[in-house]
Amino acid sequence: MNTFVVRRLALIIAATTALVAAPVGANETSVRKTNEGIILLDQGKLSEARAAFTAALRADTSDEDARYYLAHTMILGSDFEKALKILGSRDFEFWDADYLRGIAWMNLGENEKAIASFERSIRRRDSDRARFNLGMLYYQAGDNAKARAQLEATRDGNLSHEDQAYRLLYLGLIDYAEGQQDRARGYFRQVSEDYADTAASELARDMLGEEGGAAAHGEGEAASSPFSAGLRLMVQYDNNVGLVQDNDNVAQIYNRAMTQSPEALRLGVFGNAGVRLGEDEGLQGGLGASLFIGMNGGDADNVSDFNVVQPRVQADIGWSAGNWGIRAPLLASVTMLGPFDDIYRYSTSYGGGLGGWWSPIDMLSVNSDLLIQARVYPRAGERDGTEIGLGLGATVVPIDRLRIQGGWRLTTLAEKQSNSPWGYLENGLHLGATIAATEKFSVSTGLRYAHRGFDGPFTFPDGSGPGRTDDEITASLGFRVQATDLIDVTAGYDYFHQNSVPAFTYTRQIVTLSVGFTF
């Protein structure tokens, strides 16, 4: 049985907020109260809407609209057992009553009954939301084949932004468990980049072992002295602060149903050690190793506790000749995430590249790099992929205490399964500055923009596919205090905004605090 992410409240209700028309012979009081309830429901007044629908049923116990909307309102208020009593037996099939039953049973932990309800709902009225919930339940039950079938059939943008991310994450985890490691990596990268504000994105990044994993917590800072070692402790709070979708009624109902925004608390420990050989000029080399151990946790409605362990080794060789130099790095890492059924899932990553730098004048340094990475997994998969990154940057130091950095990076991911290729091309620009106010206190700020275009025979949950584009903007502010020669404290704030055409826009805030020790 899979024990990955279980979110207790999955409420995307399909009920329309259009007013009910009175059929011939209908009870006028019941129709009037039902319409009052619909208006109140649309305004987010659940208690008042509940009272109106109850009055409508008292006036006419056969009013199916009132009965359906009352059960709907009960679910939005997390009163699942009463919702099931109102819905009654399976004979009541008005609109999509089986979908409501599935939501109620799922949140009561009755997964088998929830599965049966969602299956009946799909047979009567195909629904992407029902398929997503059904796929999630099959995944929790350990039936990966049925989970994959439902999740892959889910294409509609009626899913919430958070559930779109989890749908892709589940598909990646299924592929990972079945040895389709390269394909799993494609899903994880999509989640980490397209849904960076969700709890699912952190899980995806840790599976990838890239941004958000060890590399985001100080990795690669090999010391300038021949030998170095360090330890960093980190705590991070992540909160999704807004979402806009081109599906107003569904989005409004869903956002009101959630009692709080998705949020997560992360703890991490990062240790590294290294040695560098060579003089300021001539042949140079280095060897380093690091280990990151992390834990993610948060509200039970949104995230699940899990552990991350990532050891990594890196070696490089290069040549320096005064104002220029070249460097060829090699790296390898293992990422373990879990436990799932008392075992950790793992993947290995390796890559290499070539970079160089040139400093024509003392205040200016220009650098470039080309890095190619691949993945190796426990079992050979049917899909292979390669990521290539090409970067060009510059650092300017106009005065002693000010350093300005900027650059451009082109990243392409190309994967293939059964001779069916897909991937994306991303252009990114970044600009940042660090001001050393004193010898022990510095402030840094940064701005990053990225544009990503997708191609290949695939479809996102919102219905978009080839031709989809994403635009992302990230603004950051950080502070660093050198408490002693061996201890430093850092604090940071990041604001992230993404516009995905034709799907959605959203924003995200992240606050990070860390303490570092240098030995």
Image (spheres, helix red, strand yellow):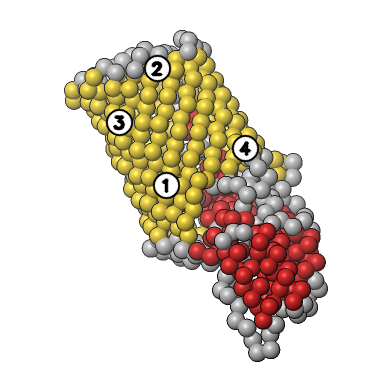
Which of marks 3 and 4 precedes in the sequence?
4
Which of marks 2 and 3 precedes in the sequence?
3
In terms of secondary structure, where does tag 2 sit?
A: strand
Dot in front, 1 or 3:
1
Q: Where is residue 432 in the image (x, y as percent from the top left)?
A: 33, 32
User: Which residue appears at 57% of the width and 70% of the height?
Assistant: 17
Give the distance between the C-alpha atoms of the residues marked 4 and 2, in whole angstroms: 30 Å
In terms of secondary structure, where does tag 3 sit?
A: strand
Q: Where is residue 138 in the image (x, y as percent from the top left)?
A: 71, 60
The amino acid marked with disc number 2 is Phe
User: Which residue appears at 26% of the width and 17% of the height?
Assistant: 400
Judge whether 16 appears above or below 378 on screen: below
Give the distance between the C-alpha atoms of the residues marked 2 and 1, in whole angstroms: 29 Å
Give the residue number, with chain letter if any, for mark 2.
Answer: 441
Give the residue number, with chain letter if any, for mark 4.
Answer: 296
Which of marks 2 and 4 precedes in the sequence?
4
Say whether residue 195 is left or right of residue 100: left
Give the number of marks.
Answer: 4
For the view shown, which residue lies furthest in the bottom direction? Answer: 24
The amino acid marked with disc number 1 is His
Give the residue number, with chain letter if any, for mark 1.
Answer: 497
Which of marks 3 and 1 precedes in the sequence?
3
